[in-house]
Image (cartoon, grey):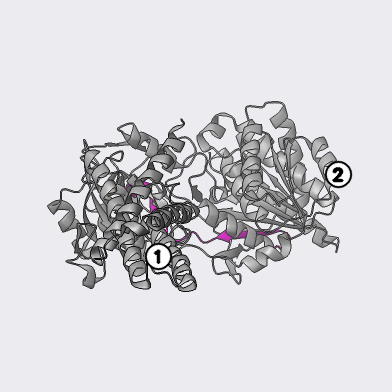
Amino acid sequence: MPSIIRRKFLLGLFDIFVIMLSIFASFFLLSQPLEKEYLLFYIIFSTSECVLILTMFALAGLYKATLKYTSVIDLLKIGFAILLNFIFVSIFVIATNSRYINMRYISILSLVLLLLTAFIRFSVRLFIQIRNNELFPQKENQNNVMIIGAGDAGTTILRELLNTTKIERNPVCLIDNNPQKVGTTILGIPVVGTNETIQENAKKFHVKEIIVAVPSISRKEQQALLKICEKTNCKVSIIPGLYQLVDGTVSIRSIRHVSISDLLGRGEIKVNLDEIMGYIENRVVLVTGGGGSIGSELCRQIASHYPKQLIILDIYENNAYDIQQELLRKMPYCNILVLIASIRDKGKLEDIFKKYNIDIVFNAAAHKHVPLMETSPNEAIKNNVFGTLNLALVSEKYHVKRFIQISTDKAVNPTNIMGASKRICEMIIQAIGRRQLSKGKCNTEFVAVRFGNVLGSNGSVIPLFKKQIAEGGPVTVTDKNITRYFMTIPEAVSLVLQAGAYASSGEIYVLDMGEPVRIYDLAETLIRLSGFKPHEDIQIKITGLRPGEKLYEERLMDEEGLKTTANGLINIANPLEFNEETFFAELDKLYIETYKESDSIKPIVKELVPTYKF
């Protein structure tokens, strides 16, 4: 007999015993003797009750659960089934005017049956938990845990920690900023203080890990809270957001380690979704480099704004496949096409633009890794400069409505070939835009969007730091005073999309990324939030600036100024004047030397970008 059928059969026998016991116990409580001449009725009544109640229990789903996991929900189901039984039997008694049983007996029977069924089922659950050592589980190598937040999310996490031996976390105290909760207990664990006492109580209870379970607080409040936690030298984990509390997915699996994006020192950047929707909806949108970190996030956000078709173009098929499959799972309604091609191949681009009647182009295809491009400068120029030129010229030819070029703050006064190549890309966008305007006809709005480092992108310092910490260090920083602007990938991409709504040919949009962050401080913070002490548990090693690397990045060149847009976080750089004819002639020279694999590329680039220092 299969185990599930055997379990249901045994549970049914168990309930028959409880029903029979209740029937005869009710006679005893009423001091009502069982007369021999009524024996046949008692047998029929008892059998009928067993059949009726077992049927009610089965319909209520009580035989799908196990006694080990009996819950309040099961108690409600039992009560509802017994109530229905009471109604049916009462109708029988009233309709037949029975001499053998009365309404008083039926009421007592229902009450006794409810109490006995509930008592015995919960007693069995308690016995199983005690036998399996689950009531007060002993965890080996357990780490003491402090939970911040004594609300619904914190209670859910606490219950899960208490009820399993498979998680090596031992909750010892809770913190809540509501003073009325301080001094109370939740599931036997004390609420010991407010946020101001975190450091004190972490030391008192020998806490190794802090779980922040307050999903409803603002980003600013979260940052202040995490700053306090950082001082404890405990490992810090967090529940990401309020939505997980709403949709019921708060659990141990929803806890993640705190990331630097939680500590950017500013609130989350918001965009005007209506503006984005207006120019994306029902348009054919091409994203080049669509499998990369920026390109894939562009695809996610564009797909959510109902384009007529989203075309993902990338030379690396694995990344393109990954984002394609993700979007097909999450947004099956979106018309997605993946093309494997390089923006260096102008003939292939011509073929694509002929076939698909593209409305909007986001060019995120580029070589971005600064040290690698220093040793392969010709490849940086081939891909970044002439790939962008190919794409821009084809877009102009086929009357694309908007062309948005992804740029970087490394294009400002560049000290590396990657930054210089991106500055040339900005100049290409400006030159083609001006050329259109000089003809009095602007078929395509060409714009570039300039921003700094994005957290979590390919080549970002954060994944490297996390890997180095996991390996026991050292964490490598090129210079103690190096600073960078930071933004999360979704923030940067949402602003790129909104900048596309403002598109006016030849403009360069500059994103406000807040204050620059010192990388050395960032490394120390990440070490502490991982539960280690900087310079003791994990060392920080200064390695020296890499080829082409700056101590700090700039958002503007000296000659540029800023004009504001409706979104205060998106500004427009005043365009720099240059001779377009001379510029395109120098581009032709650069093309020839690049494909001749010349060793003198950098001086030629210097002629195009006077602010380039190498």
Q: Position of residue 208 (x, y in %)?
A: 22, 45
**Nearest to N terminus: mark 1 or mark 2:** 1
- Percent of width and height locating residue 73: 39, 58
The numbered mark at residue 516 is none
Residue 310 pos. (x, y %): 73, 49
75 left or right of 403?
A: left
Give, as a three-letter code, the residue at label 1.
Ser
Q: Is residue 543 visible?
A: no
Q: Quadrant of residue 603?
A: top right
Residue drawn at x 73%, y 63% is 279
Q: What is the x, y in percent for residue 500?
A: 67, 60
Q: Residue 216: which disc? A: 1
How would you rate the neighbour count of disc 2 (Cα within 10 Å): few for under 14, some for 14-19, many for 20 or more? few
Q: Is residue 61 left or right of residue 331?
A: left
Image quadrant of residue 296?
top right
Q: Write the residue at 41% across / 62% down.
A: 82
- SS for callout 2: helix
Measure the C-alpha gap from mark 1 to mark 2: 48 Å
Relative to 534, is 191 above or below? below
Q: Is residue 275 left or right of residue 18?
A: right
For the residue pair 589 and 379, the one nearer the viewer reads as 379
Q: Which residue is mark 2?
A: 355
- Foreground: disc 1 or disc 2: 1
Residue 333: in magenta span: no
